[in-house]
Image: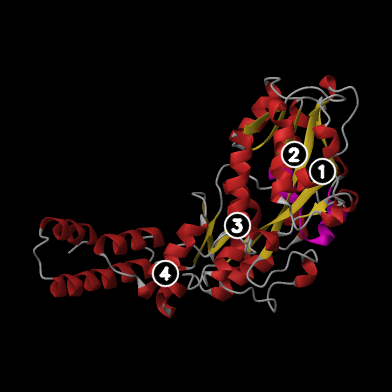
Amino acid sequence: MSLTRTLYEKDLYPEIEEAHASAFGRDCMEIAADRLAKGEIDRRTFLLAATFLGLVPATLGSGSARAAAKELVIANWGGPARDAYANILGAPFEKATGIKVVIDGTGPLPSKVKAMVDSGAVVWDICDMDTAKTLVLAKQNAIEPIDYTIVDKAKLPPKGAYEYGSASYILSYVLTYNKQKVASAPSSWKDFWDVKKFPGTRTVRKQPDGMLESVMLAAGRAKNEVYPIDLKLVVAKIRELKANLIAWSSGSQSQEMFHQGEVVMGNLWHTRATILHRESAGRLTWTWNEALLSYSMWNVPRKNPAGREAAMRFLASAQDPQQQVDLLRAMGSGPVNPAAAALVPHDLKMFDPGQPAAVAVQVAHNPFWYEEPSGRGNLTNDALAREMWLDALSG
């Protein structure tokens, strides 16, 4: 009897006794597990079957099924990153280990990770997650601690080795501007707020991520005094600029605002600033000064199907400096391995947020502040910041 037919019959005959249906379903799962081991179906088909049958596929985490699968699923945010991860990170790992690497570009939302772990039906082995979400998932006991006997701390930046996450690449938020629409090059967030010297509309993100620190700098805080963030001060400063401000909700939208001439300056992801620079032959550009330097993180969900060791081996493989330079060329994401800086070719150095000269003038993101209690009910600083930021932009 085929797996397809058993699923069909379960839908047709809901009156089957629960005990019988459970036994029957588990028998179907044994068949599916055997087919998985033989390579006749892939792991996602196996999990889909489990979902329809209302069963937790515990066998996926067992030794035989896990070993037979020979597959490592990495969840990222799709787009160019999907192919880049597959070709640059996945292919060398596959060659070295024989473990197939599959990239799932649907986006590893923390809620999905938590639900998978709680249900016992974990699909992903590794997730590409930001630092703040890493801390949240660690508190929820949803991700594994990093095994630093396999992953090399010496190949990570000093602040890139977390207990439950290891840095995968650098992302910076930078002051981007149109050289043809400003009298001189702005070099600080105080300049961003100076509408007399630099008239015109600016853009910031609709969410506070990467924005709050720039407001603190505009308010006169030194780089080493950005934290703790004064949210009341942030709201007051945003309202000062409100008449000259519009917000972006996606990277493509922030880019389009510059192309359409809607804005003269903006707080953008450095990857979008890089694209604008290249497309405009340098007319649209940015400064690293007072940019916010942050890390994306590798996370490993608890009870991941391929096993903790296989996931850690991939994380170690992805520390290769040349692979990280190749990702910089393909996606603009900055290498985290300090050894990569010297390997970056001359034509890419200006686009690399991890170059020593660029790092020296940036502000280091502090994700731990965001997870601290805000003092308002049960809200963390992050939750309160989102509430107050959206209110300041809309009010």
Q: Position of residue 85 (x, y in %)?
A: 61, 52
User: Badge 1 is on which residue?
Assistant: 219
Depth check: give the residue in front, 114 or 30: 114
Q: Amino acid type of disc 3?
A: Met
Instruction: Pick whichever, 297 or 313, lies toward us.
Output: 297
Answer yes or no: do the residues labelled 2 and 3 have beta carbons within 8 Å? no
Q: Residue at x 30, y 64 (%)?
A: 50
Do residues under tags 2 and 1 come within 8 Å of each other at their CB atoms? yes
Tell me the SS state at disc 3.
Answer: strand
Marker disc for residue 47:
none
Q: Quadrant of the N terminus?
A: bottom left
- On the question of residue 275 being in view, the answer is no
Residue 340 vs residue 108: left or right?
Answer: right
Mark 1 → mark 3, Cα distance in angstroms:
30 Å
Whether label 4 touches label 3, CB < 8 Å: no
Q: Which marked residue is nearer to the observer: mark 4 or mark 2?
A: 2
**Magenta stretch: dominant secondary structure:** helix
Along the horizontal axis of the image, is 48 left or right of 131? left
Answer with mark 2 or mark 1, whichever residue precedes in sequence: 1
Is residue 329 shown in magenta?
Answer: yes
Find disc 2 in the rendering and name its residue.
Answer: 237
**Can residue 321 be found in the magenta stretch?**
no
